[in-house]
Amino acid sequence: MSSSVFRKTRWASARSCFSDQRCLATHATEAKTQSHLLTAGVVLNRAPILTTAPTPFERAFYDYQRRIYRALQNPFPDYFYFKDGSVLEGRFKAEERAREKEAFGKGFGEAVDDSTSILTDDDAEREQEQPKLRVTKADKLKDYKSLDRRGPRNLYLLIKGKPTDKYAWRFPQGATVRKDELLHEAAQRLLHEQCGDAMNTWIVGRRPIGLLEFNYPTNAENDHVGEKVFFMKGHIFAGQVKPKDDIADFAWLTKEEIEQWVDKEYWNGVKDILSDW
Amino acid sequence: MRARLLRVRRPPLPGKPLKYDARGVPIPSTKLMVRDTGPSTLADHYHYTLRDDLMYMTYVHEPSARKPPRDLRPTYDPADPYTKFRYNPPVGGSRIAKTPPPPSSSDNVVRLEKICLHSFQDAAISNKSALLGPLMAFRAISGLTEEGGGRKSSEGVQIVRGRKNVGGWIRPGIAAGVRVDLKGDRMYDFLGSLVRFVLPRLRDFEGIPLAFPGKTTNIPSAATGVVSFGLPPEAMGFFPEIEVNQDAYPNTYGMHIHFVTNATGIGAQDKARALLSGYQLPFKSRS
């Protein structure tokens, strides 16, 4: 008997809650203890700009394969590709000799007197291009704000917010999703609001790549008990961050560096959405 | 000092004399096979950048397991002894355009499997030697030969022969074109030179044309992960392998290019297009 009465009253109160607006106001304290603010965040990525440097094993493997390839290949039909005694032919042969020497070592690819070519060895050596260094100035100076650093790796944008924020170093996050706004639009707006409009960026797709849930400090005055951040992935193509007033600092970091810079709790929430490479 | 290419030191002679195959080519004493000879820029680009993005873009969330497909017509029950051996005819018509894609996972992110080039030569039907030019050009572009590098799977440039008898045009067995399949590193090399050297220099090329808006998408090609387009004859001269000695070829030849991906099911062609645009291949909408 008593339980059925209880059920009835609970049902009645729930119905009145739906119908009566005042009910929401009276339950505000209860809402604070339960609901999280839904916000958008951006994991802004600078994709690798250099190929990965091969490991010693990979280098040895490629060298070996190139030697086999060179030893097995058909004779090159230079009569088909070059006019006899042309500059292009001389240059090609000089390069080919250098490759032969590199592949098979001393004794191979040595220059021999040839009266048909008009190109000398000195010409060929002078024209050889030197590749650019993989280590840049930003690498040496450890300039964490530079986008030229760590060419073969994925870099991610971290920003430092206000001192009152729960996490000092974090991804750009905290844009409340407005009514009639989609998640990727909120993410794009967030980038403009926090990191300036001097960047050419693109938000990948319309689906979030990760969810971070955290509670505000207990003494903070907020309507919500915490935040649920839906992270979108973004790419930067050009430009640089111009931090707005409430952003103290920014840095472009690899995954391992991010672990050193951010709070442990934050790291556990976001580490799986970052690329290992 | 004037120079000429010469391999001065002779390779060491093997202990036993080598055997020779039917073509008179020596068979090495060990089984040799050439694998990748260096890192590939575009393969790296796919592995470290594109794959993640494509997974996020093409992901479809399915919280629960899929329902089994609906039976389109009643079938005889094989458990029933009266109907056990009765033939269940398959549902008629092509089902390709109606197959659903496999559930999204990190294993079946769209990736490029091969690029197929082919060129049909009308003149070759009456004159076989008209195929020599495109054959040579395709060999130069692809760098592939039959069983090249000791790979049994490498078919090199193949002659395409007619299969049907079409009156006044083609007969079965008549050599009418050339084709080559590119895979692995060679595929990425070709894609790189296509995107960097050929397409930017082509006049009037605005991109691979998309289907007209309003055209039905419920067609078999939309459910196969293949994107195809054609290059005009003048594009052949822009490939660096041809450009160095274009006057050695009797003519320039157009070609069809098919990008074959692993995507299947409804929407597969869109996934393939998303992948190719990640390699900087432009698409043009027709409105």
Image (cartoon, rainbow, N blue to C red):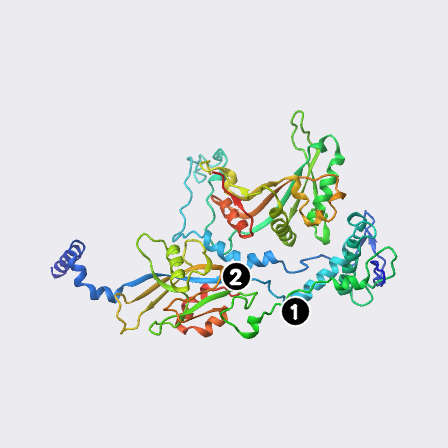
Query: In front here: B97 or A1?
Result: B97
Q: Amino acid at mark 2?
A: Ala
Q: Which mark is residue A56?
A: 1
Q: Nearer the viewer, residue A239 or B64?
A: A239
Q: Pinpoint the chain carrying mark 2.
A: A
The answer to whether residue B169 shows anywhere in this view is: yes
Residue B154 visible to the viewer? no
Residue A3 picture location, percent across and down: 14, 60
- The residue labelled by disc 2 is A47
The three-letter amino acid code for the residue at tag 1 is Pro
Where disc 2 sits, the SS reads loop
Asked which quadrant contains residue A214, the reply is bottom left
| A53 displayed left or right of A22 | right
Q: Is residue B269 above or below residue A54?
A: above
Going from the N terminus, do you reach mark 2 or mark 1 first? 2
**Residue positioned 60% across, 46% down in the render:** B199
The N terminus of chain A appears in which quarter of the rendering?
bottom left
